[in-house]
């Protein structure tokens, strides 16, 4: 059971941070964007809005960090069980 929880959490993190597939499907300048695509929009060719970029990165990372804190015991058990067997 802990191995399945670990796989689910690690896949959720990978999907949450995915950049390539949404950029291919959604394109640039659309009304609907994922968080990584919206963060990229803050970095222009000549001007980078670092305050907005760092705030968006913090807001994007917060759910992952909170989820890890709640499921830390299961993640560690799954990684240990997967490495021993």
Image (cartoon, helix red, strand yellow):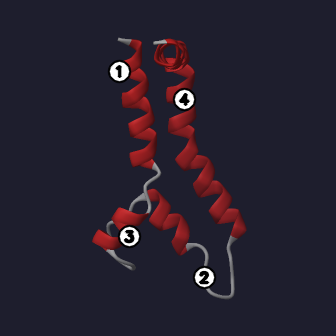
User: Disc 3 designates what residue?
Assistant: 23
Instruction: Say if mark 2 contacts mark 3, CB within 8 Å.
Output: no
Helix, strand or loop at label 2? It is loop
Helix, strand or loop at label 4? It is helix
Mark 1 or mark 4: whose residue is earlier in sequence: 1
User: Disc 1 designates what residue?
Assistant: 4
Instruction: Say if mark 1 contacts mark 2, CB within 8 Å.
Output: no
Q: Residues within 10 Å of mark 1 (few under 14, many from 20)?
A: few
User: Disc 2 designates what residue?
Assistant: 44
The answer for how far apart the CA atoms under marks 1 and 2 are is 40 Å
Identity of the residue drawn at 43% across and 55% down: 18
Q: Who is closer to the viewer here, 29 or 73?
A: 73
Identity of the residue drawn at 54% across and 70% down: 40
Which mark identifies residue 77? none
Q: Residues within 10 Å of mark 4 (few under 14, many from 20)?
A: few
Mark 2 or mark 4: whose residue is earlier in sequence: 2
The answer for how far apart the CA atoms under marks 2 and 3 are is 16 Å
Q: Who is closer to the viewer here, 30 or 4?
A: 4
Helix, strand or loop at label 1? It is helix
User: How far from the left and from the top, in percent, is residue 75?
Assistant: 50, 20
């Amino acid at each position: 059971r802990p191995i399945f929880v670990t796989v689910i959490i690690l896949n959720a993190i990978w999907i949450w941070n995915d950049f390539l597939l949404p950029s291919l499907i959604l394109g640039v300048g659309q009304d609907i964007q994922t968080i990584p695509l919206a963060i990229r929009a803050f970095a222009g060719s000549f001007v980078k809005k670092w305050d907005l970029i760092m705030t968006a990165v913090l807001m994007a990372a917060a759910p992952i960090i909170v989820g890890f804190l709640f499921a830390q015991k299961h993640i560690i058990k799954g990684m240990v069980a997967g490495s021993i067997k």
